[in-house]
Image (tube, grey):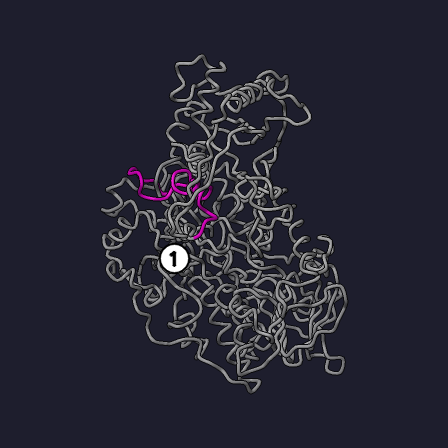
Amino acid sequence: FFDGNNLFGTGFFSTKYNEDVSFPDVEAYMMYLGLSHVTPIIWSKLLNTHDELFASLIESYEGMDGNMALVSLMRTQSYGYVALNGTNPFNPPIIDTNLFSDPDNMDIKRLVEGMKLMVEFYENSTTYQSIGARLLPVPWPGCEKFVFKSLEYYECYIRHLTFTLWHAAGTCKMGRADDPMAVVDTRLRVLGIQNVRVVDTSIMPRITNGNTNAPALMIGEKAADMIIRDNGGFTVFPVLRQVEIFRQEDYVNNYIEITTNVTEIYDFIIVGGGTSGAVLANRLTTLPNKYRVLVLEAGNDPPWISYYTGYDIFAPNNQGLDWKYLSQPQRNCCLSCFGGRTGAWRGLGLGGSSLVNFGVYNRGNPGVFDQWADIAALFHGCGGEMGIDKNLHTPGLEYFLPAIRDHKLTEQDVNVNQTNTFMRTDQTSMAGVRSNTYLSFLLPILGRKNLHINRNSIVTKLLYDPLIPNKVCGVEYIRFNYTKKAYATREVILSAGAFNSPKILMLSGIGPKGDLMELNISVVKDLPVGKKMQDHPATLFPIVFDKPNTSLLYERDVIPGVLTNALYPPIFTQGFFQGNNVMGVGYHSTKYNDDATFPDIEGLFIYLGVSHLSPSILEHLLNIDRDLFHAVQKLYEGRDGNMVLVSLTRPSSVGYVCLNGTNPLNNPIINPNLYTDLDDMDIKRMVQGMKYMVDFYENSTAYKSIGARLIPVPWPGCHKLLFKSLEYYECYIRHVTFTQWHACGTCRMGKVDDRTAVVDSRLRVHGVLNLRVVDTSIMPRVPNGNTMASAVMIAEKAADMIIRDHGGVTRIPGSQEPCPIPFHLRDEL
């Protein structure tokens, strides 16, 4: 869909009124858009026509395939004008197109003939007859009195549904000095005025009989040539100018000739410009330190979708924005996943996974970090670069908050206390725009001369000092199919994430000795790289409501805004676009948990109703067959409700990451080994968690008032079990399995005598000089919260340690004082 402009064909033809067949008077566009229920909304905005009129025309045919045909008059005889609307320069001009005002009415006659010919094009061709193509047999409101498809009917239709192709021209007409209608001469100089030219479509003597974009470019090219010659300059053919542009990088300070194998020497090389790498790059290039830093990022600058907080559910698993990794087939879960594999999504590009995550700001329980010594002091404060805000678009919040009180739960910040605490979600955003680490930490510093960023650079291995075999001195990487090398005089820092940091280590001879020898990789250091992977297993289920307008439905609340407003700031930061789809977050301790202050279950409450689009979206997001989701929800599609995500925050199961051969372009093998703990406590806790979250809706006064309930349709494959029994919940969880994409532990931090550790407490790789790992892979255990905040904290702490270790000057990232309540939330809170 994104590849096309919605037009699959165009054509010119002459009506019976046209005297020159080589110069047609009608153009047609054939659009491959069927009869959607959102069509009236789209055309109402585009054509300034009441959507009720379109709706009355297509209501009996909504959901059917078809085309939209646009017919346009190319050789109009009517003339309009543009005039001032007062002397205020901010007033829009008065524009009168004077359509169909020619004295002999030939404009309307030609267009009537054009519409007749286009209807016949569809109805009288063998191919279109074979699929029943026809003009919708419903008259336009106001034209009912005319015989349908008569010339009088077509004229009535055209006079009602009138617009232009927005090809305005001729308002500063080009002509000779003796032409009373001319404004500019043939060199586009305003007649009688010195040093002023007009260069746009307004200079056209007559409107062209085609689209005006190409002529506008031609006018610009020709004008530039004339202006340069008139002022004694030298002109260059456009294609040569383009070649010169292609030789440059995005930013002047990042210019590196990409076709030569030049040697690059820096103080520090950061492999990966993701969540942690972006923070590191910012801190290590801050004055007064003058370290020269190279960031090697496999992706590119973030695309537009990464700035929209509300698009988080669509962002993962997209080419160019995600590595699109999949896990190995799971043994006793992911039963409804394609191939038994769950997605292992990781962000690709500057900003990393902060581009594709759900933007939930959740630091995790302090108990997780007790073993991290003094790190916890750097967690939270104000004055930093990353914006933290409440989700400002939360339909259904008026039921969620009372439900918390109904269940005697604590309503407070889960970043302060997690003991059976629920709250409205904090999200990483500012004024409705996602606060990814690219926007927060990298974009503001792209002009620093001591920072170089090489995008599209895939690191293939570490380079070692030939005199000291365990001392890293640089990296080898591939960029635009060229193999290059870069050297670091101080350190190489891996921030490539929980999957790619261990991959690079193992490709470079740092990893489990047996695994490396099996692949004939020379062993530099025998370490348990990739062996302690953990992630948060999760499931997702739909709750349906009886009361309308209590949630967000794609077809009702999202699609019209996406199609008509998405690209028009500041509208894209309003409504759906400013929220991360997560209304609330809550923590719960199951009966198996021994510490109420350190809960084992997290719930995310998503304000998305039961949309007919949900199965397709969830298939893309969770790698689960859309037909299965559709089978459960089909009787309830179009109803309001919530999606509830339940996640195990303290899993015991441990997975691994290993190499998939020695080709550095191969994806790593990823196996989270979900629900493989020996005593089955992981699945038992999840079953209790799902039961509790269903009860949260069905047994609270607030949600009972709108008929909230688990959709009473069993998941295919679990239908033989008693619905809502513990056995049913276990079956459901084993079928609808995924993770929260919080992978960590693959380069685990620990003491030298810890046989499971890869890095020490200063994140230096054990037994290897000048090499650190700074990302979530170093976490000893997965925290019981979302990992983005922790990834930023790890980078902040690491930057501080690195600068101190090299005798530099450190800075405190932000105030450690409590944050004031934002003005827009004070009354509410």
Residue 768: % across, % down: 65, 78
Residue 509: % across, % down: 70, 70
Q: Residue furthest bottom?
A: 807
Badge 1 element:
strand
Residue ID for mark 1: 602
* Left or right: 487 as drawn, with respect to 368: right
Q: In this orientation, which residue lies closer to the viewer: 316 or 662?
A: 316
* Left or right: 665 as drawn, with respect to 547: right
Q: In this orientation, which residue lies closer to the viewer: 317 or 4?
A: 4
Q: Amino acid at mark 1?
A: Glu
Q: Residue furthest front?
A: 178
Q: Is residue 262 above or below residue 603?
A: below
Q: In this orientation, which residue lies closer to the viewer: 480 or 461?
A: 480
Q: Is residue 543 above or below residue 490?
A: above
Res 717 visible: no
The residue located at (63%, 72%) in the rendering is 294
Q: Is residue 758 above or below residue 320?
A: below
Q: Residue furthest top?
A: 147
Residue 47: % across, % down: 45, 35
Res 259 visible: yes
Is-magenta flag for residue 559? Answer: yes
Q: Quadrant of residue 634?
A: top left
In magenta, the rendered stretch is 543-569
Residue 136: % across, % down: 48, 20
Q: Quadrant of the N terminus?
A: top right
Q: In this orientation, which residue lies closer to the viewer: 555 or 39?
A: 39
Please tell me how crowded label 1 is: few (under 14), some (14-19), or many (20+) other residues with Cα within 10 Å: many
